[in-house]
């Protein structure tokens, strides 16, 4: 009887250890985009122009059937407006992040472990964050490059796989 109880306890221990290990290896997905085309109405914080608004709608179409747990954006009109239609459709709040915080991706990866997050950024920050998450070497986007979507799946920051789409 004691031997059987010991076997059950050890089996439960190994089962729980495997489950905990599997959970720690659970994949997180970040969908990173640069804001859509911006207008010329304000040199510091412009709104999207008409083409940018159309691109924001295309982003919604692209991700309409994707489960999204959070949408984060820099606190600028153009980045927030790019993800606003998607946030409305998914009934999610757009959460601001500070692009000057060098640890922002680590913090977000920890907070949203195992989840899917859309990250709206800029021509310089978006590829930089992809490189942080997946140890890749994407270069800064050109000023007229608005159509890339970087899908990064990772189990830990720095160890990820990237798929690049255009929309």
Image (spheres, rainbow, N blue to C red):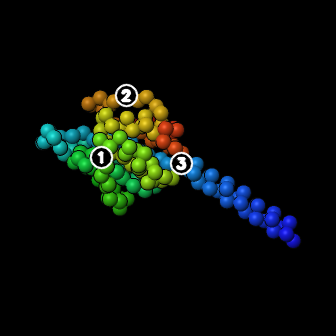
How many residues crowd around disc 2 within 10 Å: few (fewer than 14), some, or many (20 or more)? few
Q: Callout 1: helix, strand or loop?
A: loop
Q: Which residue is mark 3?
A: 27
The image's mark for residue 139 is 2
First of labels 3, 2 by sequence position:
3
First of labels 3, 1 by sequence position:
3
Is residue 24 shown left or right of residue 107? Answer: right
Q: Residue at x 47, y 33 (%)?
A: 135
The CA span between labels 2 and 1 is 21 Å
Q: Residue at x 31, y 34 (%)?
A: 124
The CA span between labels 3 and 1 is 24 Å
Where is residue 73 drawn, in percent x and y?
A: 31, 48
Is residue 19 shown left or right of residue 12? Answer: left
Q: Quadrant of the N terminus?
A: bottom right
- Is any atom of residue 96 visible in this view? yes
The CA span between labels 3 and 2 is 25 Å
Quadrant in which residue 32 is drawn? top left
Q: Residue at x 32, y 59 (%)?
A: 93
First of labels 2, 1 by sequence position:
1
Where is residue 65 drawn, in percent x and y?
A: 44, 54
Q: Which residue is mark 1?
A: 98
- Is any atom of residue 66 visible in this view? no
Asked if the residue at tag 2 contacts the one at tag 3, i.e. Cβ–Cβ closer than 8 Å, the answer is: no
Q: Quadrant of the C terminus?
A: top left
Is 90 drawn above or below residue 127 in the view shown? below
Q: Nearer the viewer, mark 2 or mark 1?
A: 1
Q: Callout 2: helix, strand or loop?
A: loop
Q: Residue at x 26, y 30 (%)?
A: 143
Is residue 165 shown left or right of residue 124? Answer: right
Where is residue 80 drawn, in percent x and y?
A: 27, 50
């Amino acid at each position: 009887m004691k031997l059987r109880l010991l076997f059950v306890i050890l089996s439960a221990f190994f089962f729980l250890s495997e489950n905990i290990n599997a959970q720690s290896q659970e994949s997180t997905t970040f969908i990173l985009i640069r804001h859509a085309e911006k207008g010329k109405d304000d040199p510091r914080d412009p709104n999207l122009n008409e083409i940018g608004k159309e691109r924001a709608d295309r982003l919604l179409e692209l991700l309409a059937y994707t489960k999204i747990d959070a949408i984060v954006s820099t606190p600028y009109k153009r980045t927030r407006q790019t993800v606003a239609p998607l946030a409305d459709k998914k009934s999610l709040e757009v959460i601001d992040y500070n692009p000057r915080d060098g640890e922002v991706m680590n913090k977000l990866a920890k907070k949203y472990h195992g989840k899917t997050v859309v990250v709206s950024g800029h021509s310089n920050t978006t590829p930089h964050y992809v490189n942080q998450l997946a140890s890749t070497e994407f270069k800064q986007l050109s000023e007229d490059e608005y159509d890339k979507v970087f899908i990064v799946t990772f189990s830990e920051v720095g160890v990820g796989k990237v798929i690049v789409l255009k929309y």
